[in-house]
Amino acid sequence: MFDSLEKLLAAVCEAVRPAERLTVSEAAAKYRYLDNPGSYVGYWDNDIAPYLVEPMDVLTSLEYTGMIFAGPARCGKSDMFFNWLTHTAICDPADMMVVHMTQNTARDWSIGDLRKVFRHSKEVGSRVIPGRQNMNVHDVRFMSGMRLLVKWPTISELSGKTIPRLWCMDYDRQPMDVDKNGSPYQLAKKRATTFKRFGMTVAESSPGFIIEDPKWKRSKEYPHEAPPTTGILALYNRGDRRLRYWGCWQCKEAFEPNWETLKYPDCKDPMEAAEATVMVCPHCGFIMTHDGGRDGPGKTEMDRKGKWLKEGQHWDVQNGKVYGTGLRSDTASFWLQGPVAAFTDWKTIVYSYLKAQEEFERTGSEEALKTTVNVDQGRAYLPQGSESDRLPEDLKARAEDLGEQVVPPGVRFLLAAIDVQRNRFEVQVMGFGEGNDIFVIDRFTIKKSKRTDEDGERLWVNPASHPEDWQLLVEEVLTKTYPLGDGSGRRMQIKATGCDSGGREGVTKNAYDFWRWLRDKCETPDLAKRFLLLKGTSNKASPRVHLSYPDSDNKNRHAGARGEIPVLLINSNMVKDQLNAMLERKDPGNGCIHFADWLPDYFYNELTVEVRTSKGWENPREQRNESWDLLVYAIALSLSRLVNAERINWENPPGWAKPWDENDLVCENEDNKRFASQQKADYDLAKLAEQLA
């Protein structure tokens, strides 16, 4: 381990060396060296992100046992840990533990970012005991006797240890209930309880959870309070609630530089709007530019003169004094807004938001919008549907005279959706038009099986127990056609059908067997290619839809799947967010939903029973919601590779999405064969034979 007596003595002396009296920010400036070519090379400079100085220096304060930092991406919040590690290793040794999202992220961080600190910051790296056994992935030992543990949130890693200094990294991406024992922050804080005021537990993250109460408003009594949510902002609310303030260069009033203070022109080009972004003082209307100039300072200079204020404090910018009694807590909590972040600019924040807004308006998906609000703006997200007080009568008032069970003008193709219930199949047929408008043109229930009782009466269908009942779907749905609304007698066939594959025990197996029957035994060819089974996924990080093939060796062995059956997995929350947005739209041609005026009242009731909560979309009163679910299935089916509706070029659509006169799925009457229009020849072979004879 040591190749000389001198090095051995130096290591022994390190353990008894008196602490160097520096704050964390001072130690970082003196000892932390960064080597990021193209970005920054040199010792840590507190002037680049001055808002980090106070949170860092709190880490050694005996007044607090916790520190919370909520902020956007690219603000340097994770760098505070390395600065704290630098101070601890050199100035005041003590055991530390950093908790990552998962074991894999802990490993990657340890091998990558942590090793770079030891390599480039020589004063820190030289204090690690030589030898591979002293610097492994999850445990680093220092000459002073301190240890650094690199862990992840499991109850085994967050219990049974006594550690004075702990750091929860990217907190909102960690499980909020670790093995049903509580939040990672609370479990981590217990590890430092023995050290009382000498212990410190930290959590940092950009917000990742939605606002739970859409009607919440900031009160005048508590203007620093974060909205009700889970994760890092909930921890922030427990602390003394510090917000970053700037002083206006013109009126000398303090204001919080948040998203609401950014202003940009309303123009069609997002980049043009973003490039013109300025910040406007909410008190006097003074305009500040990002880089500053003759008319005033820019962002960096404004923040160098900025201040953190606790709940209850106010700042007299003119004389530089802070007045008022701050909220008292054993936790110092900080919430930084996106426009202040040192390593991004206002143009980028606004551009990301405008592009996400475009995507939401085009597809109804809120995922990009939520991401930019969380990581660019540093705020919790309020789902679009949370503010809706939609009533059944409001939707019914929008109903149109589309004709009864006919294809209205503008519809280019039909999709059918099937919801499997205990003793029935609920079916909804929907037309899709240019711009992905949806027209609900039919809704019906398949109740009676072809099975009969002793008296010859038809029995109720039972999708879970009787596989033969599924075959009703061929005649009743898959091969059904609908008359065009032009009175020509022509009919349109259904492009594809999506069917729920979950529910009571037996449903999944029978659904899979039905797909095989369509493929191998059904007299009508190719129906298996037009029939797609659907299933919701619990993985919140999954895309809106993706195709899977359940295998009997894995989770679905009870269903008899052998890896050949395609099942479309649906991220239900994302697709329901999209549906919710579409229900709000009233302008045709932009993803609007059209209702035929003959639809019954229960149809509209079923569209309003689900509500958006912090856990996702829920049906709190467990009322019937088939209309809602069937629209979700249709949207998911339209996103699948079978249809890919969002990628259709309406100037040159595929044959099955062309206007009626050219549409491959429009037939002269119900007896026409599928694709008859494509099979017609330009010549008669019999006549040609006669001519050649």
Image (tube, helix red, strand yellow):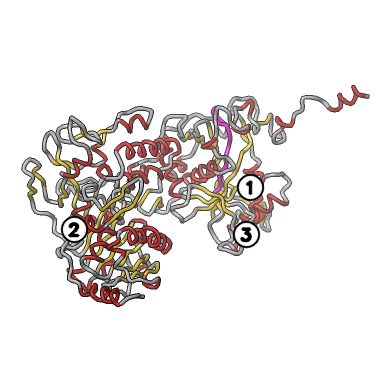
Q: CA distance from mark 2 to mark 3?
A: 58 Å
Name above or below for residue 35 compared with residue 476.
below
Viewer-proximal residue, 417 or 364?
Answer: 364
Instruction: Please report the residue visible at 19 percent of the width from the left and 49 percent of the height from the top.
Output: 243
Task: Identify which residue, 434 or 454, lies in the foreground.
Answer: 434
- Mark 1 lies on a secondary structure that is helix
Judge by depth and name the residue closer to the eye, 622 or 646. 646
- What is the secondary structure assignment of the residue under circle 3? loop
Q: Nearer the viewer, mark 1 or mark 3?
A: 3
Residues marked 1 and 3 touching at CB (< 8 Å): no
- Where disc 2 sits, the SS reads helix
The residue that mark 1 highlights is: 473
Q: Is residue 335 magenta?
A: no
At x 29%, y 47%, the residue is 378
Q: Give the residue at mark 3.
A: 561
Residue 78 image offset from top left, x and y in percent: 30, 55
Three-letter code, disc 1? Leu
Gap between marks 2 and 1, in whole Å?
68 Å
Q: Are marks 2 and 3 in contact (CB under 8 Å)?
A: no
Q: Earlier in the sequence, mark 2 or mark 3?
A: 2
Say which mark, if any, is on residue 57: 2
Most distant residue in the right direction: 693
The amino acid type, in three-letter code, at marker 2 is Asp
Over which residues does the magenta segment extend?
406-419
Q: Amino acid at mark 3?
A: Ala
First in sequence: mark 2 vs mark 1: 2
